[in-house]
Amino acid sequence: MCWSATADLVAGAGIAAVGVACVAGVRRPGELPLAALPLLLGAHQIVESAVWRAGGGPGPATTVWAVIALPLLALWVPVAVLLAAPPGARRRLAVPVAAGLATAAALSYVLAHRTVTAEIRGHTVGYAVDLPYAPLVVVGYLVATVGSLLLGGDRAVRLLGVVVAAGAALCAVLWRLEFVSTWCALAAVASVLLLRGARRPVRSGPG
């Protein structure tokens, strides 16, 4: 999320461009889902620019935003990390993947049966959906996304996990204060880190 429709659109286009560069640097098929993550994040920002322009509400853009942010990312991130990880790191990623599957299933059910609404709050957009067992779902989401990055076998992926964890905490504080939404900045930093990882030379040896 960014602080205006224009900021979301510009940030989304820039992040998607980084995603194209990440995909172009892929060395093996298993790395493709993780390399394509900035493309998904960029599309997410562009969708939110439509939410801004619609003035919030429960429209199609709001629903698409929620589908990407909630079940899709909950499953995409741990599976992408698993596919990109060296064999020695895959066993410990079983928990984040399982958490992602369960969380994505629960969130998909909620989105299929309940309405998501968006509200413009100054320089932020607030999203609301009636989510049962919300604390448990949030824990599952964090284990799936941040947890999988922190447990990734690649040092660059683990660094990304640290940055995402710290950045998400800061962004959440600023968002709750309704000061300004800075999630797009976090997405941009994460995308650049992925690009750096994609361009590193291949290293032989165990992960």
Image (cartoon, rainbow, N blue to C red):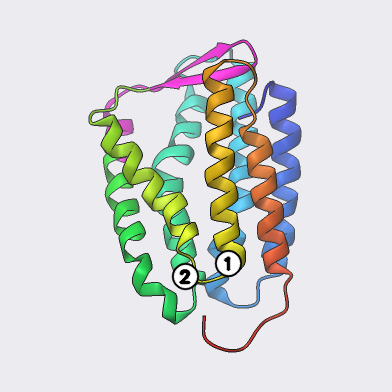
Residue 162 image point, x, y percent: 56, 52
158 on left or right of 197: left
Q: What stretch is highlighted in magenta?
A: 108-128
- Earlier along the polypeptide chain: callout 1 or callout 2? 1
Q: In this view, does 129 lie above or below 45?
A: above
Tell me the kind of residue under disc 2. Leu
Is 91 part of what is drawn in magenta?
Answer: no
Residue 57's tag is none
Residue 32's tag is 1
Residue at the spot 69% in from the left edge and 62% down from the top edge = 22
Residue 97 image point, x, y percent: 35, 59
Tell me the kind of residue under disc 1. Leu
Q: Label 2 near label 1: C-beta < 8 Å?
A: yes
Residue 195 image point, x, y percent: 71, 60
Q: In which quarter of the image is residue 203?
A: bottom right
Given this view, does label 1 or label 2 mark the residue nearer the observer?
A: 2
Residue at the spot 36% in from the left edge and 69% down from the top edge = 92
Label 1 packing within 10 angstroms: few (<14), some (14-19), many (20+) = some
Q: Quadrant of residue 174?
A: top right
The residue identified by callout 2 is: 83
Q: Quadrant of the N terminus?
A: top right
168 on left or right of 134: right
Q: Is residue 16 above or below residue 4?
A: below
